[in-house]
Structures are given as C-alpha cells and as structure tokens.
C-alpha cells in the first residue's frame, strides 16, 4: 500500500517537475506569505518578550509598588519605617546612565535593588539564591547584572567596568539570563553612588500577596500605591503591535492568493491525469490522501523558506522598530533576534493552514471529479458564474457589515474588523464589477476584433479574478496607508513647528542646578524669556498621565496649538482653576469642554475645569497642562523639569554650548529647537519605516500573484487564440491584444482601487487612529501619490504579462495547430 | 445464445447479464443500456459496434468498473462487479482489467518508460522482462526517455497499449483505440494489439465503429439504442 | 550557649533554598570554615558590659537567643523561641558596619511558637547599616523588621543587667509578646566566657542569663492566651566555632525544679569522637563548668520529622551531681523549616530531677 501511494505521489509530483515555473509560483506564494507573517510575528514577539522581561523582572506579573506622590525620589528612612512596621517591602532606585565614549549615546536604565528583601520569584531569583553570586553582588565593588543581548548590543565584555559620562565606573558586568534589554541591575548601594542619590529611593516593591488589598500606609510615610506600573508598557504599545499584525495578516492573505491561483491552475491542468489515475485503479481515498500529502510537502517546503526569510526580514526591520518603540514609548526592546523553535512551529503551522485554505478547494474539486472524463465545459462555466454570484453576495454582506461597524463599532478591534470586511468585501465584488463594465463595453457596436476583445476579456475575468483581487487589495491598502502616513507626516511637522516655540530646551539635573541656570540666564542679554515647566507623572483614572505645569506667559496664548477651547482659556489656567487636556486623554476619559476633572494630589483633591483640547501627537500617555503655581503649591518638592529659553535665532547655538560648558550638561540635557525637531522626525520616520516596507512587499506579492495566474492561463490561452490566428491574425497582433487586455483589466482594477483606498484611509484616520492613539488627523489628498502607485501597479502588471505575451509571439504554427488537434 | 456447454461456461472471462443504465439529462431520463447481455471466452476477442449514442462506450465503462450499472450483473473472471464499493472497484480496475482509451490518456509528466510501467506498478506486478519485450515489440525501445508530447499519435497509442498489457490482466478493454489515428497507424497499432493480447493470453473487448477493424476480431456484436441488435460469428 | 545557635546564617539558608539540599561544606552551615580577616576568640580576654551586649562586626557570626518555657492559665505548656543572627560577609569595624548600604552585615531572625499539638515558625532577613535590623546597647535593643528584644531607657535601671526585656515576634498564624525579668547576674560559660568547641581550639564567646521570669501573651491562629514561665537568654559570637569535621550538635538548656540551671551540649564528629561540654548553675547563679568525662547524653527514642530521623527522647546523666533524667520533647515535630533547617523545641525532664527546658538539634 505504501509503495502504491508512493507511486501515485511520484506521478502527481512529476507534474511539478515538468512545470517547474508553476511549482516555483506556488512555493513563492507560500514563501512570501509565510515570510511576511513570520517576520511580523517575530518583531512582535521580540517586543513582547522584552516587555515581559521588564514586567516579570521581580516577583512575576504586574508589580504593585509604593511611590512618592509626585514620582520623585524619597528618603530611604521610609523603607526602614515600613519594614519596622512589618511591611514586606523592598527598596529600589531607578535612573538612567550614559556610557562614555560610545558613538551612539544610548542611555541605559540603571536599577538598584536590595536582594535580601526582594520578593521571591522573578528573573533574578536564581542569582539571589546563589550565595557566591549574591555576596559578590552586594559587597563592593559589586556586580552589574546585564542581559546577554544588551551586552552584545553595546559591544561590552563580561567583567568589564565601563565608564559613564560623569566619570564614574560601573561595577564589573555579569550576564544574567532573563533581564530586560537595556537594563543594568546593581546593588542599591551602587545605584545610589552611580546616580548621585545617597540615601534616596525611587520606589518600594511590595510582596504581591501583601499588596493585594492595598493596606493603608502609616501616617508618617508619605508614599502612595501604584498598581501594575510595568504592565503599562504592554498596554501602551498594544496598538502599535496590532497595526503590525494587521499588516502582516494582509500580506499573508495576499500571499495566499498566489497559492490559490497556482494550486487551482495545477489542478486544472491535472484533471486528465487524475482521471487516468482513477481509471488505472487508484481509489478516491488514496488519491485524496496523496493530494493532501502533496500539499503538506509543498507547505513544509514553502513554510521553511518563509520562516527563514521572515526571520531575515525581521532582523532587517528590528533596528527601526526598536528605535521607534524606544522613541515613542520609552520601551526597551532587544535589537538582537534569536531564532526560536516556536517560530518554526507557528510559521510552518500558518503555512500549512494557508496551503489548506488556498489549495483545499482544488482538492475538493478533485474529489468531485467524475472518473469518466466527460467534463462538460458548459457546466463548468455555469458553476463559475454561480461562484461569481455567490462571491458578490458575500461581498455585499461584508460591505454591509463594514457599514454597521462604522456606525456601532467602538474599539480598535472593531476598527480592524471594519478594515478587513471593507477590503475583503470590495475584493469579492471585483469580478462582478469587471464583468459588468466589460459587458457594457461589449454592447457598443464595433468591429469583430473589438467585439472578440471585450467578450474574451469577460472570460478572462474568471481566470484572473483572484489575481486581480490581490492587486486590488494591495493597491488600495497602499493608497490607504500611504494617505494616512503622509497626512500624519504633514500634520505632525506643522504641529511640531508650532509646538516647539522656544529656541533652546534645558533639562536641569536637580533643583539646585535649575536655580543656578535660572540666575545665569537672567544675566544674559540675548535671553528674552525663560519658560520653566514642572512635569510629573500621575495616574488619572488608572492611566499614566503627564501633568505639566507652565507659567503665565503670553507666548503660550500665541503659539500653543489648540484644537478647541473656551474663549480665552489661559487666564483661568494661570489661576489654577482649569486645565488644557491632550486630545488622547480627552478621548480616553470622554472629556468635553467645561467638564470637571479632579486630581489626587499630596495636598488633597484639585478640581480642574476642562478649558480646551490640544493635539499631542506621538505621545502614548495623556497629558494635562496646568498652572505652574498651582502645581508647585500641591507638589512643593517638585523640581523644575525643563526650561524653554527664548533667544534670538543667531545666538541660540552659542548659548546652548555655553550652557553645556558652564553647567557640565550633556547634549541630551541641552537641545536646540532644530535638533529636537530632527529627533522627533527621526522617530516618526522609524515608526513608519516598517509599515512602508511591508506595504511595498505586499504590492510585490500582488504582482507575483498576477504573474502566476497569467502563466497558468497561457496554455489554454493558446487554444483560444488559435482560431484567431487561423483566421488571419499575426502572432504579434495576438500578443499585443493579450497585453492590451491585461492592461485594460488592471487599469479598471486600479480605478476601483483608488476610491477603495480613500475609504480605507478614512477608516484609518477616523476610526483606527482614534481608537488606537486617541488622535484624529486632518484630512489630506495626495493625488500624485495615487498616480504614482497606479503607474507602479500597471508597470508590475506589464512586467507580469510580458512573459506570457512573449510566448504567444514566439509560438510557431505547429503548436497553434496542435492546439487544434488537442481541442478536437 | 445460451447453448454452451459446462466447459465453455467455465472458460468465460466476461459475463454480462441484462445490464441496464439510465442517465439523467435535460430532456429527462435516457436509457443508454436497456438489458444487454454478452459474454467472452478466455483468450478470445469481441468487437462491440454501433452508432454514436448506441451505448457501446457506456457498456465498456461499466465493464471497466469506471461506472456502476442500475441493474443487471457483470462478472469478470467469475467476480461480480455488482455491489463493489469505490475502493474495491479501484482494486478491480488496477488488477483485473486494463483500458486503452481513444485519447491515449497518457500521463504527460512521466517519461514513456514510466508510463508503460505505471499501471503494472500500481497493481504491484511489474515484470521488467515482459516490459522490455513489450517495448521492443511496440517499437518503443528508442523512445523510452521521451515525454508523451514528444511522440506522434500512433506512438502514443502504442504506449497506451503497452501500459495496458504490462499489467497482464485477464481482460483488456479498448475504447476506439485507433479513433485518433490515420489508417496506416491504425492498422499497425491494431496488429500489435491483437498479437500482444494473444501472447499475453488475455481476452479483448474492443469498441469500434470501423467494420474493417472489427472484422479482425474473433466475434462482432452490434448495439443499437441500448440493446444487442445483432452479432456476427 | 550554644553553638546551637550557630545556626546561622549562611546565605543559602537564609534565602530559602531547598533544605534537603543545603550544602554542609565545612561543619554545620559552614561554621567550620576558615575565618580569614576576622578576629579570633582567645582565652583570657575579659568580657566588658554593656559593650558585649551589642554586636561584634569584627567576628563573623553572632547571635542573641531567647527560649521560654511557658504555661497558660489552663495549664497547657508552650514554648517560644526568638533568635537574631548576625553574619558578616566581610570583616568590618563598627562604624563601617553602620555605614548605610555599604555594611557587610546580614541579619537573620528566627521565631517560633510551640505547643504539644503544633509548631509555627517564621524567619526574617535584613541588611545591616540602614536600621532595618541591628542591636543597640544603651538601652539594650535587638531588632529585625517588626520583631524586637529590648527595653527602653526608663525601664533599664541597671545597665549591666539585661533586665527587664520585652520580646515580641509575629509570623504566619502566631505572635507573642513577653516580659522578661531577672535580678540574677549573668552566667559566663567555660573559662570566663571562653567556651571551647573542639579539642583543636575552636571556641566562642558565650554567656547567658538563664534566670528570667516571664509573663505575657501568646497568640495562636488568632486566639490569645495569657502565659507565664521561665526564659533563658544566650549570647554567643565567634569567627570559626566548629571544627571542619563537626557535623552538628545536640544542645540542652534546662530549668530544674530546685532552681538550678543546666546547660549541656555535644558536638558530633564524623568519627564518633563527640565533644562534650556543659555548665551547672546553682540557684544562686554560681556556674560550674562540667568536665567532658562527667557528661553522658544518650538518645532513647527517635522520631521521624520532615523526612529525617531525630532523637526526641534522651537520657542525660551527670555522675557527680547524681543527675539522671529522661528528657522528652513536648512536640517531636518542632522542626524549623528555615533556610538551614534544624530542630528546636521545649522538653520536659523527669527522673532524679524534674523541670523544663529547650533542646536544639542540628546537622541531622
């Protein structure tokens, strides 16, 4: 029986040997689909793994911690007080350090822990359990625990003691598995030394069981509970990853179109073969099993290639993704990918699933194939038009669903469901649209060739439908995403121009330095104004929110870009009676003008009236703008976080370098407007680099799908063209007609893709963006972009059609004649 | 017709009795076979003639186990086809009979040598010596490494004949085997077919509309509108 | 003394690794390992109070140990244990040991409450130098987190005596709060506090206050009982108290009915040449070191506790004192399942003398 099956498999596979191009197309489809999907999954899981490592560093899961109300550092006496009251707390001090001499001045997060009181569990558990390691960690000079990927990324060596920009040396490096990327873990004593914070802590970890019901703190300990701080990162970045996943899925689906086209073609060509096999005594069950086995082999082959390339793709994009996650969310993501066994499995699984979906229908067709070869072409055509009717019905249903989602959907997921049903619905309706257009064209009286042209094109639609759908999807996705990205870019740059109104921005290291800088600046004639701000992070209704205190200065009223506001919002803001809210915070809390919002502060509740709403693009956290005086009154110890300096344009660079020299501030603490803008734009570009790359690939995949379909049709095409040849048309004319036919079909598809792309862009801007980020972008039109894309698509179609047309041109009379014989 | 002795009865390789088959069509039910009975002795050949639509091809397909009759019985080598399921009929097809089609139905992606061996391999009874003898007699020895599309029609049908005989089935079925060939090729293929059937000790049931070719077989029978119209001995 | 109390603190133990796999590299809990850079215990140096109530960071290990035999109003017997261990990861002087996180001192607290039908225990771990745990001498106070042993300045009228003291601890399912009072002088073991631990010179500084009268309350699963009884305080410090081949010890502190007190221990060697020592203390507080040859300690019955077999019934004999008693554990399951695990619990004695006391067994 096994030998028997082997022979049948051998025979089926011999088809691919004879049609290597077809096999290549099928494999390319699978390969691309799996590669794009695996690539995106690799990117996402890499990022998620990094977040998990951060979240699970200590005693598993979402950490509940104690903080000073304003998030500032506090004296470690509070730790001792709580311990002596029986609280199972562990001290922690966090800050950032910069390595000296590194070309890329990336900062590393430094975390100081106290291992003896650290709650059990978490990534460092094994190290803490090891007496020798623990003793080395706690005793001077201590150890710096670091993740292997961070070590590699910074080109550091185990045992080295890197120097920081302020001249201090890190304790010797020691690799600990499972640490989050970009983090240095040192003993609390080392952290206080390295961060210049003797006797200070930034938070207290609390044993999870004890923290569960948030017991009230003793009166003499002015700290507050904060729940699940580390889990914020995963939540904030969710939408970013969902976007990537959606793109990956789109690419996967488009890839499957290729597989479907190639598998369908192979089945069509092997109808006779299958019937012969049946006639020679192969049972239906055996045939079915062998066909499935064949799909499995192809899926494994294409899938393996796909997983490998997906990994390469992810490695290529990882740098950009990591940079934008860091820039946007402050999330540390390891830049080095490791090929994981689970990716192989999921990648191959997806490939298998995709192959079954895309190739299953042809296996089903084989099942229904009668043993007797009397397939009636008429019935086939009827089935085809039934299929188009069914597809169109499904398409209309999906569009109706999309409409319903516009009206009733209210989550990011429903936003993506809207996109999916819109795209799929439109794609399913494409064959009907094309046939209708062609039928209308055919009605116009014309010469015989032209009549044949339109009639034959209609027939082509059924063969090329799937490929054209892939083209429609890819093109409209490109137009939609392109419009959204480009619109975002323009809005963002305009907004940056307005928002960054000061010429230099300074971040003092501490309150004393802020004071000194203030005095120094007051002496400088070129400084026309100082705009200090006080910023701190609080939680408003459970979400992390930045509170920013600004002084009363006319520049704010002149330049701060407001989306809507009550008339003259600045005086009540200065009076501490109201606040301006960022768009995303207003969206999250459903705040309207005039609403009241009450903040918890160390000095008690602070009721604020909502005075207006402003755009705050790129900031995943909500923001509240309040009066500096009001903020200082409630958080008296809060140091100045930044000073904006207004100076004449030509003096700005000198002033900036003078500030750096006088106060010994690094480049990251004194930055002029131009550099800040450039930095923001870099982050922006990085954020969309992956999107753009995936988009382009999707278009390429659609072109391959089209090429595959044309290739498949080429043989049957010959017999359709042979009568025309017999009736006096030259092969060159036939080739030209075929080419024209393809371009015409593609052009119609492109025409449909533009409005679909615009609808898609609208959904992205008005639905998905609002749900994902909380901001709405002004609408922009980019006709030149559409034109470019359409031309690009037509070029792709032209390239895909040239091969088959060339075959027609090269075909000699013998082959055309033979196609008569075969037809007989 | 039933006046045979016990001994002759025992030598029947094919026995068809009162076979009926109806196809549903746009114009309602159409009785393609309406009670056909025939038999074939071992080592003999029978030509089945008739006009288009007389039901001769349907009869052949039923005997080949490609389709199922509505009623009546077919016995090949004493085994009844009635009531066999798909899998059993597949086994029957690959070991008890071999069909030669008008359109050759070679496997385009396999070389001639593999096409020749194909059904014998499926049936698990490939005999290399017999295969090479077949190839030689069929004049295919030089063409073994070619693909079917590189052969002429006559050559392709010779491959199909070889494929059927390689199995050494008790019964060979041929459906207009020379219908796609010119007269010279047809005669040539016919000669080879009859020679080899005899060498193999098989029986042959052949559908043809050519009286000239039919005359070369042991017996002839004519179908008309689904019934046996007459036979020549 | 006790070496027993030596249960110390090696980190492995402290940090809750699987007790069955606790390494015994050199003596029990590493107490037999070399003591480089640390001070050594030398005969003839006088103890100085109240300084020697406090910590000695130049020695590697040290402990403050209280065991109390109590009876509640219904007559039920209870035992309470309160221990603070100090271990130095590196030799330091007092000011270094108090210099914030740079302190190399690690503190470990053990507490337990035992009754016939149950035994609850807890442990605490802290770093020295910042005030989470430590010992003050004036007034005396030893603490770790919310556990403490000490008195306030107003109470401690006589600074050279550790009295009165409050001792309290809390853990899962239990807590206790006891007042300890005694007018008796401190008892110095061995040669004026120099207590030898092997024939090869290992020794520790060791003194006790065995005459405490106790009253207070214990809480068991939320239920509070008033208790009273006797308590024994041990202070001991050293840098290498065990010889490398000593694998553990059996130690008794006994309150006899007639007011005498008795401390006995044996250090078990791999080759069965056990090292015996003890102190007989008269009701007036006069201490008489016992010669090894006078002491006989014989296990009578074994119990299976936490997967090990330990002697929870003993015959104790001191020939020239006409002392021949059987000591029986109040609760044979008084197992301290802490980082380095050991057995510690109250015992009752009967025979030539009657009384109560505590037994500690390590290295099983």
Image (spheres, coloured by chain):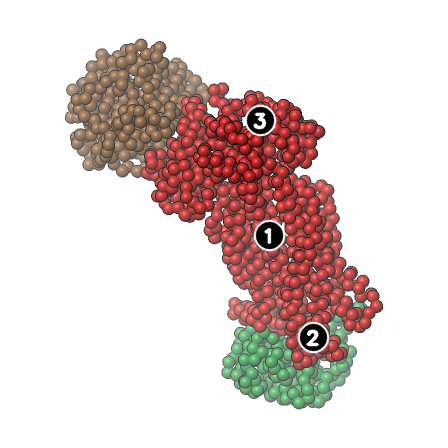
Residue linked to disc 1 = A692
Looking at the image, the residue that sits furthest to the right is: A445
Residue C129 against residue A137 in the figure, above or below = above
What letter labels the chain drawn in brown?
Answer: C
Q: CA distance from mark 1 to mark 2?
A: 39 Å
Q: Is any part of residue A17 visible from this angle?
A: yes
Residue A731's disc is: none
- Specify the subunit that label 2 lies on: A
Q: Earlier in the sequence, mark 1 or mark 3?
A: 3
Q: Nearer the viewer, mark 3 or mark 2?
A: 3
Residue identified by numbered label 3: A628
Q: Which chain is green?
A: B
Label 1: how many residues lie within 10 Å, few (<14), some (14-19) or many (20+)? Answer: some
Residue A130 visible in image: no
Are circles 1 and 2 on residues that touch, CB within 8 Å?
Answer: no
Judge by depth and name the residue closer to the eye, C204 or B48.
C204
In the picture, residue C57 is in which quadrant? Answer: top left
| Chain letter for the residue marked with disc 3 in the picture | A
- Report the front residue among A820 and A504: A504
Task: Name the residue carrying label 2.
Answer: A732
The red-coloured chain is labelled: A
């Amino acid at each position: 029986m096994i030998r028997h099956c082997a022979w049948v498999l051998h025979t089926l596979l011999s088809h691919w040997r004879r049609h290597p191009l077809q096999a290549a197309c099928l494999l390319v489809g699978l390969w691309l689909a799996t590669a794009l999907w695996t690539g995106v999954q690799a990117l996402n899981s890499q990022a998620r793994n990094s977040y998990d490592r951060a979240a699970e560093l200590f005693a598993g899961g979402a950490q509940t911690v104690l903080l000073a109300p304003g998030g500032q550092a506090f004296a470690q006496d509070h730790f001792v007080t709580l311990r002596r009251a029986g609280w199972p707390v562990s001290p922690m001090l966090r800050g950032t350090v910069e390595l000296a001499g590194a070309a890329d001045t990336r900062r590393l997060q430094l975390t100081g822990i106290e291992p003896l009181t650290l709650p059990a569990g978490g990534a460092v558990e094994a190290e803490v359990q090891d007496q020798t390691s623990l003793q080395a960690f706690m005793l001077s000079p201590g150890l710096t625990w670091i993740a292997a990927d961070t070590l590699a990324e910074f080109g550091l060596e185990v045992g080295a003691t890197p120097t920081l920009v302020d001249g201090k040396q890190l304790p010797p490096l020691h690799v600990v598995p499972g640490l989050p990327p970009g983090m240095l873990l040192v003993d609390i004593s080392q952290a206080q030394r390295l961060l210049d914070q003797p006797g200070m802590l930034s938070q207290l970890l609390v044993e999870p069981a004890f923290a569960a019901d948030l017991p009230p703190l003793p009166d003499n300990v002015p700290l507050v509970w904060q729940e699940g701080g580390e889990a914020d990162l995963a939540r904030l970045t969710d939408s970013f990853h969902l976007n990537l996943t959606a793109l990956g899925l789109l690419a996967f689906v488009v890839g499957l179109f290729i597989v479907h086209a190639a598998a369908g073609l192979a089945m069509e060509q092997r109808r006779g073969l299958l019937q012969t096999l049946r006639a020679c005594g192969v049972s239906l069950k055996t045939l079915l099993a062998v066909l499935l086995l064949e799909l499995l082999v192809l899926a494994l082959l294409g899938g393996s290639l796909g997983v490998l390339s997906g990994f390469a793709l992810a490695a290529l994009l990882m740098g950009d993704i990591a940079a934008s996650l860091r820039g946007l969310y402050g999330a540390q993501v390891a830049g080095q990918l490791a090929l994981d066994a689970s990716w192989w499995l999921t990648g191959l699984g997806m490939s298998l699933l995709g192959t079954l979906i895309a190739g299953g229908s042809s296996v089903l067709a084989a099942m229904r194939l009668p043993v007797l070869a009397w397939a009636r072409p008429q019935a086939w055509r009827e089935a085809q038009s039934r299929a188009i009717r069914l597809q169109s019905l499904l398409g209309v249903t999906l569009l109706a669903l999309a409409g319903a989602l516009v009206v009733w959907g209210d989550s990011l997921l429903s936003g993506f469901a809207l996109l999916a049903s819109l795209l799929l619905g439109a794609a399913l309706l494409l064959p009907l649209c094309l046939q209708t257009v062609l039928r209308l064209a055919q009605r116009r009286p014309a010469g015989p060739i032209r009549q044949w042209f339109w009639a034959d094109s209609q027939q082509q639609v059924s063969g090329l439908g799937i490929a054209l759908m892939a083209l429609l999807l890819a093109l409209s996705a490109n137009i939609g995403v392109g419009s959204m990205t480009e619109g975002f870019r323009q809005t963002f740059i305009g907004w940056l121009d307005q928002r960054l109104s000061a010429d230099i921005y300074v971040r003092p290291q501490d309150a004393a330095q802020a004071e000194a800088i203030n005095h120094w600046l007051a002496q400088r004639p070129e400084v026309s104004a100082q705009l200090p701000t006080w910023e701190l992070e609080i939680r408003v209704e459970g979400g992390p929110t930045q509170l920013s205190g600004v002084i009363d200065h006319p520049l704010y009223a002149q330049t701060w870009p407001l989306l809507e506001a009550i008339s003259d919002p600045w005086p009540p803001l200065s009076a501490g009676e109201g606040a301006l809210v960022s768009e995303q915070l207003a969206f999250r809390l459903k705040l309207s003008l005039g609403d009241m919002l009450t903040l918890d502060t160390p000095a008690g509740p602070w009721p604020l009236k909502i005075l207006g709403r402003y755009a705050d693009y790129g900031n995943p956290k909500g923001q509240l703008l309040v009066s500096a005086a009001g903020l200082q009154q409630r958080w008296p110890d809060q140091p100045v976080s930044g000073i904006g300096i207004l100076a004449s344009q030509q003096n700005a660079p000198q002033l900036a370098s003078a500030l750096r020299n006088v106060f010994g501030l690094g480049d990251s603490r004194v930055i002029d407007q131009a550099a800040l803008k450039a930095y923001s734009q870099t982050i922006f570009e990085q954020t969309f680099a992956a999107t753009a790359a995936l988009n382009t690939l999707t278009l390429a995949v659609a072109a391959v799908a089209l090429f595959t379909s044309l290739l498949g049709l080429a043989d049957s095409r010959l017999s359709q063209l042979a009568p025309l040849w017999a009736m006096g048309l030259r092969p060159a004319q036939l080739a030209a007609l075929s080419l024209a036919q393809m371009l015409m079909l593609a052009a119609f598809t492109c025409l449909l893709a533009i409005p679909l792309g615009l609808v898609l862009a609208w959904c992205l801007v008005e639905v998905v963006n609002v749900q994902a980020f909380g901001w709405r972008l002004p609408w922009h039109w980019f006709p030149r972009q559409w034109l470019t894309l359409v031309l690009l698509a037509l070029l792709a179609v032209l390239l895909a059609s040239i091969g088959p047309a060339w075959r027609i041109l090269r075909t000699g009379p013998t082959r055309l004649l033979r196609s008569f014989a075969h037809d007989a | 017709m039933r006046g045979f002795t016990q001994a002759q009865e025992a030598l029947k390789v094919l026995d068809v009795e009162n076979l009926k088959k109806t196809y549903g069509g746009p114009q309602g039910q159409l009785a393609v076979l309406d009670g056909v009975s025939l038999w074939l002795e071992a080592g003999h050949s029978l030509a089945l003639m008739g006009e288009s639509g007389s039901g001769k091809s349907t009869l052949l397909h039923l005997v080949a186990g490609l389709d199922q009759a509505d009623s009546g019985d077919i016995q090949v080598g004493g085994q009844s086809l009635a009531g066999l399921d798909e899998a059993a009929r597949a086994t029957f097809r690959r070991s008890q009979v071999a069909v030669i089609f008008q359109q050759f139905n070679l496997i385009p992606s396999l070389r001639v040598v593999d096409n020749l061996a194909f059904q014998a391999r499926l049936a698990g009874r490939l005999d290399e010596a017999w295969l090479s003898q077949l190839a030689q007699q069929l004049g295919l020895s030089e063409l073994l490494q070619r693909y079917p599309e590189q052969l002429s029609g006559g050559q392709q049908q010779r491959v199909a004949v070889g494929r059927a005989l390689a199995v050494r089935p008790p019964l060979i079925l041929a459906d207009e085997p020379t219908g796609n060939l010119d007269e010279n090729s047809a005669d040539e293929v016919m000669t080879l077919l009859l020679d080899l059937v005899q060498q193999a000790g098989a029986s042959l049931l052949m559908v043809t509309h050519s009286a000239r070719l039919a005359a070369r077989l042991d017996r002839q029978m004519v179908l008309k509108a689904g019934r046996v119209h007459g036979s020549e001995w | 003394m006790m070496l027993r109390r030596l249960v110390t603190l090696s980190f492995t133990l402290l940090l809750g690794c699987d007790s069955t796999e606790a390494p015994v590299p050199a003596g029990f809990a590493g107490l037999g390992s070399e003591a480089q850079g640390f001070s050594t215990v030398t005969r003839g140096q006088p103890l100085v109070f109240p300084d020697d109530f406090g910590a000695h960071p130049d020695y590697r290990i040290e402990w403050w140990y209280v065991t109390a035999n109590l009876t509640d109003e219904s007559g039920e017997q209870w035992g309470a244990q309160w221990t603070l261990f100090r271990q130095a990861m590196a030799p330091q002087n007092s000011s270094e040991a108090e210099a914030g996180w740079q302190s190399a001192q690690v503190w470990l607290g053990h507490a337990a409450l035992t009754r016939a039908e149950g035994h609850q225990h807890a442990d605490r771990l802290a770093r020295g130098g910042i005030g989470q745990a430590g010992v003050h001498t004036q007034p005396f106070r030893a603490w770790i987190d919310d556990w403490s042993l000490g008195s306030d300045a107003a109470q401690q009228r006589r600074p050279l005596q550790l009295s009165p003291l409050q001792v309290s601890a809390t853990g899962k399912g239990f807590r206790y709060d006891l007042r300890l009072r005694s007018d008796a002088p401190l008892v110095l073991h061995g040669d004026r506090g120099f207590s030898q631990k092997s024939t090869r010179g290992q020794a520790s500084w060791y003194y006790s206050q065995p005459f405490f009268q106790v009253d207070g309350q214990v809480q068991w699963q939320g239920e509070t009982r008033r208790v009273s009884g006797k308590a024994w305080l041990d202070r001991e410090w050293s840098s290498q108290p065990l010889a490398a081949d000593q694998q553990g010890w059996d130690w008794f502190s006994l309150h006899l009915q007639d007011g005498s007190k008795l401390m006995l221990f044996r250090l078990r060697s791999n080759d069965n040449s056990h090292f015996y020592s003890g102190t007989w203390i008269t009701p007036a507080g006069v201490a008489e070191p016992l010669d090894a040859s006078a002491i006989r300690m014989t296990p009578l019955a074994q119990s299976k506790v936490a997967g090990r077999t330990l002697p929870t019934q003993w015959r104790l004999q001191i020939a020239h004192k006409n002392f021949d008693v059987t000591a029986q554990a109040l609760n044979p399951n008084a197992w301290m399942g802490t980082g380095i695990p050991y057995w510690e619990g109250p015992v009752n004695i009967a025979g030539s003398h009657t009384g109560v006391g505590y037994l500690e067994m390590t290295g099983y």
